[in-house]
Structures are given as structure tokens and as C-alpha cells.
Image: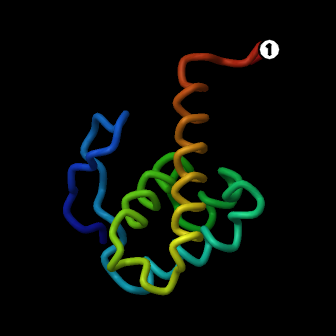
Amino acid sequence: MLAASAKVDWPGDTAVMPSTPHTPHERDRMLAFAVQWMPYGGGDAEDIMVAFGIPSETYFRRLRHLLADPGQTVDLDARTVEALLRLCRGRLEHSAASVGHPQVGQ
């Protein structure tokens, strides 16, 4: 069950986003996946869908929201948190750039 929705105040976020995972298990799963896949660009959309049942854009928005709360990332060092935030930003920018701009041949 998802927690109540919360407004995310990030540039480009115009919708109400679900709050971060509300159980330690969900939070730990999301952070472990993020750290494991960080060297490979964060995992592909299919892996994210299989692991979490959500589209990759939703995953990266939730992860970014989670990373913004220092109380949720106590097991991660500051460099890892910053690297993951950059990864989220890059993936979300890529996602936003591709919306409405289909590639040739699609």
C-alpha cells in the first residue's frame, strides 16, 4: 500500500508525486538497487519495472525524493548520495527530452 501523496518541490515536477517508500524494507530495496546499478546508469526500464512494478521515470522521481531526506539515507556517504542525485537528474532529464520527441523510425 502506498503512503499518502506528497508534493515534490523540484524544478520540472508539476504533479503530485507519491511519497517515498514508507517502510524500511521498501526504502532499503530502492537504495540497494540504486547503488548496485549506479555504475551502469541506474538500470534499464525493464529491470526497474520487474523489481518495483513502476515505470523508470516514477522510480527515479521517488528515488530523488528519498535521497533528498538525509534521515532516509543514513547508510550512504555524501558522495554516493550526490552521485545518485546526479543520476536521477540525468535520467529524468533524458526522459523529459524524449517525451513528445519520437526518434526517427518510431
In the image, residue 16 lies at what x, y percent? 24, 45
Tell me the kind of residue under disc 1: Gly
Quarter of the image where one finds residue 77: bottom right
Residue at left offset 33%, top offset 38% = 13
Name, please, the residue furthest toward the top: 104
Residue 28 to residue 96: above or below: below
Residue 64 to residue 72: above or below: above
Q: Tell me the element at label 1.
A: loop
In the image, residue 54 lies at what x, y percent? 50, 55
In the image, 28 versus 4, the foreground residue is 28
Residue 47 to residue 70: above or below: above
- Look at the image and tell me in which quarter the N terminus lies: bottom left
Quarter of the image where one finds residue 105: top right
Colour setting: rainbow
From the viewer's perspective, is 60 left or right of 66?
A: right
Residue at left offset 44%, top offset 57% = 64
In the image, residue 87 lies at what x, y percent? 60, 53
> Which residue in the protein does label 1 denote?
105
From the viewer's perspective, is 62 left or right of 50?
A: left
Residue at left offset 28%, top offset 38% = 15
In the image, residue 70 lies at what x, y percent? 35, 74
